Amino acid sequence: MAATQTDRASVSVMLIVPDTPAAVSWYKTALGAAELWNLGSVAGLHLRGAPFMLHEAVPGRKTEPSPIEAGVNGL
C-alpha cells in the first residue's frame, strides 16, 4: 500500500548557527534549499520538502550553545 500525505511521519529540526543570514545563504547556494520564511535571526527553509529551521545562537544561553561553544564547526 502506498503512503499518503497523512500516513507520512515528518520531523523538522532547529539548527543553531552562529550567523543566520550567512547560514541561509549557504544552505540555499550549496544545497538548493528554499526559504519558507525569514525573521533575521530565525529562518525556516526546506530541502526537497523537508522543513528545517535555523536559529542564531544567543551568547550565554546555556541550553542552546552555539556550535563554537559546543566545540563543533559548521553552518
Image (cartoon, rainbow, N blue to C red):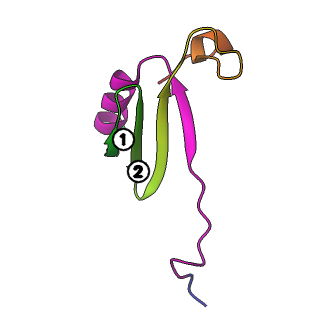
Mark 2 or 1, closer to the camera: 2
Relative to 64, 26 lies left or right: left
Q: Residue 40 location in percent, x, y?
A: 34, 27
Q: Residue 2 location in percent, x, y?
A: 56, 86
| Residue 37 lies in quadrant | top left
Residue 17 part of the magenta-drawn span: yes
| Residue 32 lies in quadrant | top left
- The numbered dot on residue 47 is 2
| Residue 1 lies in quadrant | bottom right
Q: What are the residue bounds of the magenta stretch?
A: 4-30
Relative to 75, 30 lies left or right: left
Residue corresponding to mark 1: 31
CB within 8 Å, label 2 to label 1? yes
Residue 34, compared with residue 17, is above or below; it is below
| Mark 2 vs 1, N-terminal side | 1
Q: Dot 2: few (<14), some (14–19), or many (≥20) neighbours within 10 Å?
A: some
**Between 72 and 34, the one nearer to me in the picture:** 34
Residue 66 part of the magenta-drawn span: no
Relative to 61, 36 lies left or right: left
Residue, x 34% and y 22% (percent of image)? 22
State how far apart marks 2 and 1 are (Cα). Answer: 8 Å
Q: Secondary structure at mark 1?
A: helix
Q: Is residue 55 visible?
A: yes
Mark 2: which amino acid? Leu
Residue, x 47% and y 24% (percent of image)? 75
Residue, x 59% and y 16% (percent of image)? 66
- Residue lying furthest right in this view? 63
Residue 29, compared with residue 57, is above or below; it is below
Q: Is residue 71 visible?
A: no
